[in-house]
Image (cartoon, rainbow, N blue to C red):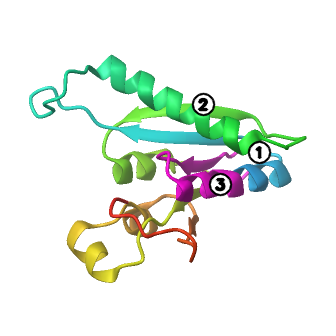
Amino acid sequence: MSKSDPIVVGIDGTPASDRALEWALNEATVRGCPLHVVNAWQYEALVDWTETSAQRETAASEQLIEKALLRAAQGRTEQPEIVRRSLRGEAAEVLESASEGAAMLVVASHTNHRIRQMVLGSTSMHVVRHAHAPIVVIPVTDREPAEATS
């Protein structure tokens, strides 16, 4: 691991992912390394019934990243180099791949309900098992309702 190895953080626009982004921003600033902010999106032309396109999904993902970074940057005097990555695919697989060569991967846990995790799976559980870098999982807070998606 070198000082140029990035910290990768997965975001999805939820309060939990905002906290993960803030934590990752702080850590990247302290370490003096780049921060890769990743949002995974999916679009299946023959499955999605909405009138949209892959280009619209990409634009929405890029906008989500920008909004999250604006919220996280408020009041900061220092920031690391930030790389924005809007990537098509299932979140767990995208983050697993993005963790290659990273100093660490930061994700938020969206649910604390064990049955929901077993039945639906969990992005954070997947990356804990399969990522190529150390993982930091930011837990759900008592003030935040558990979310069904992860």
Horizontally, residue 111 falls left or right of residue 137, namely left
Q: Nearer the viewer, residue 79 or 3?
A: 79
| Label 2: which secondary element | helix
Q: Nearer the viewer, residue 130 or 54?
A: 54
Horizontally, residue 45 falls left or right of residue 10, namely left
List x then y, in percent, for residue 107: 53, 59
Magenta span of residues: 1-23
Q: Residue at x 43, y 62 (%)?
A: 127
Q: Residue furthest right?
A: 77
The disc, 3 or 2, on the residue closer to the chain's N-terminal end is 2
Reading the image, the residue beneath label 1 is 33
| Label 3: which secondary element | loop
List x then y, in percent, for residue 71: 68, 41
**Per the image, is 118 magenta?**
no
Reading the image, the residue beneath label 2 is 66
Mark 1 to mark 3: distance in Å?
A: 9 Å
Q: Is residue 134 above or below residue 72?
A: below
List x then y, in percent, for residue 105: 57, 56
Which disc is residue 103 wearing?
3
Name the quadrant containing residue 66.
Answer: top right
Name the kind of residue labelled 3 in the image: Ala
Mark 1 to mark 2: distance in Å?
A: 20 Å
Name the quadrant containing residue 70.
Answer: top right
| Label 1: which secondary element | loop
Image label count? 3
Q: Nearer the viewer, residue 105 or 23?
A: 23
